[in-house]
Image: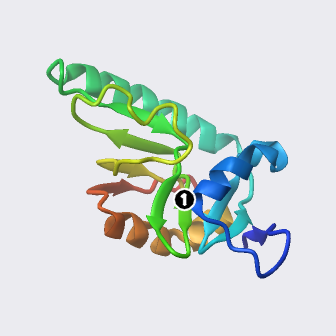
Amino acid sequence: MPDSTSSRPSDKLTSAEFETRRADLPEAGRWHELHEGRLVLLSAPEEIHGTIVLNLSRLLAVWLQSRPPGNRGYACHGLGLPVQRDPDTLYFPAISLFLGNTSFLQADRVVASAVPDLVIDIASTNDRRSDMRRRTTAYLQHGVRTIWVPDPFK
């Protein structure tokens, strides 16, 4: 299960506070998310997670290049999606795909300011897998049109 790492049990962070504090967390917050205002440390995924991200990224790049110029889109890796506000919840799916001519507007952000067209959230650890129904429901309610959930163990 996810391990809460809040400094005090009563602390609740906003997305903006999480973004500011993320670099000070272990591994620069790489496996941290914000669930209903609370910091959560997810299990680090195994090597298969990275292999899936690499292979899907290659396929998405080819597909994006086949789309008309000016309407291709781009993918972001590990971008925070604010799926709930007050208290804030930020999920960090493996890949978020933005279609259209927005030219990498979300690429340098920690937290997205737009809703992706596709989210790929890999069920590569027990905590990710056990929470996937809640995560996919939150993505849909946030406005994500398509969600892929590769599960390397199925």
Position above or below: 40 against 67 = below
Residue depicted at 18% across the width and 21% down the height:
70
Along the viewing direction, whichever of 55 and 103 lies nearer the viewer: 103
Could you tell me residue 69's position as x and y percent?
Answer: 17, 18
Q: How is the image coloured?
A: rainbow
Position above or below: 81 against 28 = below
Could you tell me residue 98's position as x and y percent?
Answer: 32, 39
Task: Report whether 132 appears left or right of 50.
Answer: left
Residue depicted at 35% across the width and 48% down the height:
114
- Count all numbered tags in the image, as a single digit: 1
Give the quarter of the image for residue 14.
bottom right
Residue depicted at 84% across the width and 75% down the height:
8
Q: Which residue is mark 1?
A: 91
Give the quarter of the image for residue 9.
bottom right
Task: Report whether 122 appears left or right of 120.
Answer: right
Residue depicted at 33% across the width and 66% down the height:
140
Position above or below: 68 against 20 = above
Residue at the farthest bottom position = 10
Could you tell me residue 91's position as x and y percent?
Answer: 54, 59
Q: Let me know if residue 125 appears in the view.
A: yes
Q: Secondary structure at mark 1?
A: strand
Along the viewing direction, whichever of 84 and 75 lies nearer the viewer: 84
Give the quarter of the image for residue 47.
top right
Q: Residues within 10 Å of mark 1 (few under 14, many from 20)?
A: many
Quadrant, the N terminus: bottom right
Could you tell me residue 126's position as x and y percent?
Answer: 67, 66
Task: Report whether 28 appears left or right of 130.
Answer: right
Identified by mark 1, the residue type is: Tyr
Q: Let me know if residue 45 appears in the view.
A: no
Along the viewing direction, whichever of 77 and 106 lies nearer the viewer: 106
